[in-house]
Image (cartoon, grey):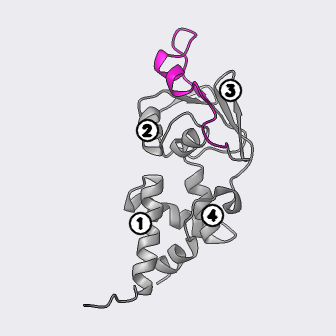
């Protein structure tokens, strides 16, 4: 019976990077760009990377419980169902800033029927402390910049930083 080999350091680092990519639904080139942005900012690179990924509009829509998955949130954003600060936004990779307000786009003064089905039991999961949800008006506000301690993604960013540092 063959024995299992211990995974190499590279294997562990790559697996962690892939986990982060698949969790946030980001392609390789985009992930590399986010890593470079995180490296340029002052502070810990890994924390900056998670902060950038958490600030993506599709992730914010998911965190506000407007969608059941990040993939569904991405599709809803792409189809133009959300406004940021009153302007229609259909770019899932848009990075929100503290003070931004994310709302459902209203059609003729009301929200479409399917939105009521999606949001009938808000919140389905806890909304992070860096976001504020107003269930009555179906709007969310970015109160602060997300921190790694609050993100709770289960991703070891240290391994991703080690991988890109080679």
Depth check: give the residue in front, 120 or 38. 120
Q: Label 4 near label 1: C-beta < 8 Å?
A: no
Q: Residues within 10 Å of mark 1 (few under 14, many from 20)?
A: some
Quadrant of the image for the N terminus?
bottom left
Read off the residue under disc 4.
Answer: 48
CA separation, marks 1 and 3? 34 Å
**Span highlighted in magenta in the image:** 103-126
Residue 106, picture quadrant: top right
Q: Which residue is mark 2?
A: 72
| Disc on res. 50 | none
Q: Residue at x 35, y 89 (%)?
A: 5
The Cα atoms of the two marked residues, 2 and 4, are separated by 25 Å
**Residue labelled with disc 3:** 135
Q: Gap between marks 1 and 4, in whole Å? A: 18 Å
- Pointer 2 or 1: first along the chain: 1
| 30 relative to 66, above or below | below
Confirm or deny contact between disc 3 and disc 2 (CB under 8 A): no
Residue in view at x 62 percent, y 57 percent: 51
Cβ atoms at labels 2 and 4 below 8 Å apart: no
Q: Which residue is mark 1?
A: 18
């Amino acid at each position: 019976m063959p024995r299992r080999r211990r995974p190499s350091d590279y294997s562990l680092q790559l697996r962690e990077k892939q986990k982060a990519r698949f969790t946030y639904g980001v392609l390789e080139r985009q992930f590399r760009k986010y890593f470079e942005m995180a490296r340029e900012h002052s502070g810990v690179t890994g924390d900056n990377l998670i902060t950038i990924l958490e600030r993506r509009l599709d992730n914010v829509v998911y965190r506000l419980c407007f969608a059941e998955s990040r993939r569904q949130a991405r599709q809803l954003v792409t189809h133009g169902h959300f406004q940021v600060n009153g302007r229609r936004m259909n770019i899932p990779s848009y990075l929100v800033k503290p003070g931004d307000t994310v709302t459902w786009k209203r059609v003729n003064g009301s929200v479409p029927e399917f939105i009521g089905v999606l949001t009938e039991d808000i919140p389905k999961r806890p909304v992070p402390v860096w976001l504020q949800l107003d269930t009555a008006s179906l709007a969310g506000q970015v109160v602060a910049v997300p921190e790694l301690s609050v993100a709770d993604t289960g991703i070891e960013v240290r391994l991703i930083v080690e991988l890109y540092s080679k």
